[in-house]
Amino acid sequence: MRDLFLLAILPALLYFMFKRPFIALGMWPWTALFFPNGWVYGAASSIRYNLLIAGVTILTYVFSKHKPKFQLSGLGAMVLLFFVWTTISTIMAIGNQEVAWDYWNRFWKVIALFIFVLLIVEKKLHLDMLLWGVVLSVGFYGNLEALKFIASGGGHAIAGMSGHVLGDRNELAVAFVMTLPICAYLLGEYGQRSRIIQIGLLGSMALLVFAVIGTQSRGGFISMLAVAGYLFVKSKRKFLFGSLAAVLVVAASFVVTSEWTDRINTIETANQDDSFMGRVVAWKLSFILATQNPIFGGGFKALENFAIWRALIKDFDAYSWFYTGDAVPVEFARAAHSVYFQVLGDQGFGGLFIYVTMLAMAFFKAAKVARIARRQLGNHWVGTAASMIQLSIFAFALGGAALSFAYFDLIFTLFALVIVLERRLLPAALAQVAGAGKAVPLHRTAPVAPPVRLPEKVAR
């Protein structure tokens, strides 16, 4: 039945995608994050949906008459530099070259999506299409799994699909948290237009909270608390927000198990938890790998090569200041379990510097866009979008500290949206206000400027 439904709607989807490049672009991350192949089993499972949609996006852009001016910015240059860096590290990879190039082959598609976001997105509708794609992929899966979790009285263990980019439950939990601010933005923009959308998005956010709980991910739980704290501080309706949070806590108390409570309580005694200290061991070995290959690292997945893992163990006691307690390396290779140590081992100290710089630039640029929008545009959608994207980036940066998914599609898509907001959508909004004769001061203390009429070419 699923196969028939998907095959039936695919021609219509392709038609609309060929008509409008931004629709095809919005479907690109949707297919990557929803993973249609994981939902079908018959004839429809043989189609490579993400590759198909990516190809359609590229073709529709190439043949479209209207092409916005390509704007890269410093953040965009850092992303491209990071891609070049990963390419060099893959060429020089010390592990299995086939594995390294296979991973690089996945990563260049992430960068391609990043580039086409910059090429195509020029309006609010385009940005919203991408964000709806995230909610209808990650959010949909989270809602479905949360309903199973609630119906089972907390017995259903939430995990990702096999073969999916979010197959690991910890990575899935952080993706759920990253989706919460996106839901909040869409709720503010579309919630008052439709009661159904308002209820749907509010329900989706509530179910995403249960979904995070159902993964039993400590990193995801901490990330969710941080996001909830930020939303509470920034909310103009703190009593309502606090009341809803209290209701969720009470409701969650009926489905969480003693196993979940015991696992979360280990956060306070992390240095005594074998699972966490095993990650610290992997962090130390990633550091040792980087010291031996300081510039470009060992290449993608180098730490997970057992021959390299075993060789690194020989130097494990050489860095006594890197605390691992009583934990020692296991006799099989493990992932780095941290986006930062993952990049450190894969791409060296140079690659880590670029990666952290990207995260910091995206975070602070989003904050800058939100600040300017608030001061000059008031309660404008550009400021809200920038704030929520900033919060989603923060959720990734915090939750990813203990997870290995540094090259996640969504985070690079958010990087691109920050650039679009800064270089295209904010200037367009400011020009529109100025063209309407509603110039607003740059600073709170500055005098109100007279209306400014921009040249027609600039206003466009």
Image: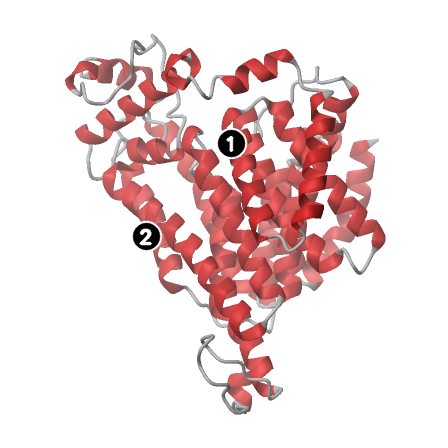
Q: Position of residue 145 (x, y in %)?
A: 71, 27
Query: Vertical placement of 287 versus 237: above or below?
Result: above
Nearest to the observer: residue 85 or residue 273? 273
Number of other residues with Cα within 10 Å of mark 2, as a class: few under 14, some 14 to 19, many 20 or more: some
Nearest to the observer: residue 44 or residue 421? 421
Seen at 54% across and 77% down, the residue is: 430
Q: Position of residue 120 (x, y in %)?
A: 56, 63
- Residue highlighted by disc 2: 81
* Mark before the other along the chain sequence, 1 or 2: 2
**Mark 1, mark 2: which one is toward the viewer?**
1
As helix, strand or loop, the secondary structure at mark 1 comes to helix
- Residue highlighted by disc 1: 222
Left or right: 2 in relation to 128: right
Seen at 61% across and 30% down, the residue is: 212
Residue 202 sits in which quadrant? top right
Seen at 27% across and 22% down, the residue is: 285
